[in-house]
């Protein structure tokens, strides 16, 4: 299911998106358009979920899959040993800009302490 006026649904619905890093029947992975680290990927569920606030017990499988794919992407990028950070922004105070659930994967440099 996709939703209109959602940039991530547009990407998911585009069969020839210019730079999908990975795609399966449940998620797509793209490079962040404004990277905050040398490696900055977004793991995005194909199903439109506005944020973690819309996730319940029924979404446990997709949430687990997002993390499994994130680790697989980190491994492919050579970041599993050096380390990486996964970030999930929820709501206004976190700075969430796009209201379609997504996981940030950042790696490739020493990441500063969280604040
Ligand atoms: P958030 O603040 O967690 O909602 O993060 C949204 C992220 O999506 C930001 O890091 C943006 O740089 C990124 N972004 C916005 N539009 C696109 C796009 N068309 N393709 C890839 N990344 C995007
Ligand atoms: Zn969407």
Image: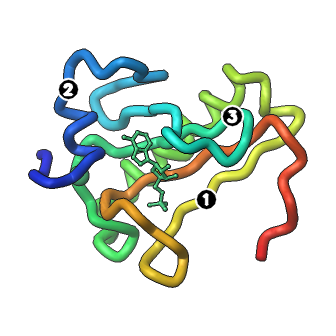
Q: Is residue 96 left or right of residue 55?
A: right
**Crowding at label 3, few (<14), some or many (≥20) Cα neighbours within 10 Å?**
some
Q: CA distance from mark 2 to mark 1?
A: 25 Å
Residue position marked by numbered label 1 in the rendering: 87
Kindly tell me whether mark 1's CB lies below 8 Å from ligand 1: yes
From the image, state whether disc 1 or disc 3 is nearer to you.
3
Q: Earlier in the sequence, mark 2 or mark 3?
A: 2
Residue at x 31% of width, y 64% of height: 99
| Position of 52 relative to 65 (above/below) | below
Image position, residue 115 (x, y; %): 77, 76
Q: Are marks 1 and 3 in contact (CB under 8 Å)?
A: no
Label 2 beta carbon within 8 A of ligand 1: no
Task: Find out whether the residues at labels 2 and 1 contact each other: C-beta distance under 8 Å.
Answer: no
Q: Tell me the residue that label 2 is attached to.
A: 14
Q: CA distance from mark 2 to mark 3?
A: 23 Å
Q: Which residue is mark 3?
A: 39
Image coordinates of residue 7 in percent, x first then y, are: 26, 47
Residue at horizontal 39 percent and vertical 69 percent from the top? 52
The mark total stands at 3
Q: Are marks 2 and 3 in contact (CB under 8 Å)?
A: no
């Amino acid at each position: 299911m996709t939703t209109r006026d959602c940039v991530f649904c547009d990407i998911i619905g585009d069969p020839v998106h210019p730079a999908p890093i990975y795609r399966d029947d449940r998620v797509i992975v793209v490079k962040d358009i404004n990277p905050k680290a040398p490696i900055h990927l977004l793991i995005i569920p194909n199903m439109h979920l506005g944020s973690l606030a819309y996730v319940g017990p029924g979404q446990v499988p997709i949430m687990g899959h997002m993390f499994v794919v994130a680790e697989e992407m980190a491994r492919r990028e050579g970041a599993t040993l050096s380390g990486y950070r996964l970030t999930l922004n929820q709501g206004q105070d976190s700075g969430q800009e796009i209201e379609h659930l997504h996981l940030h994967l950042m790696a490739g440099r020493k990441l500063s302490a969280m604040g």
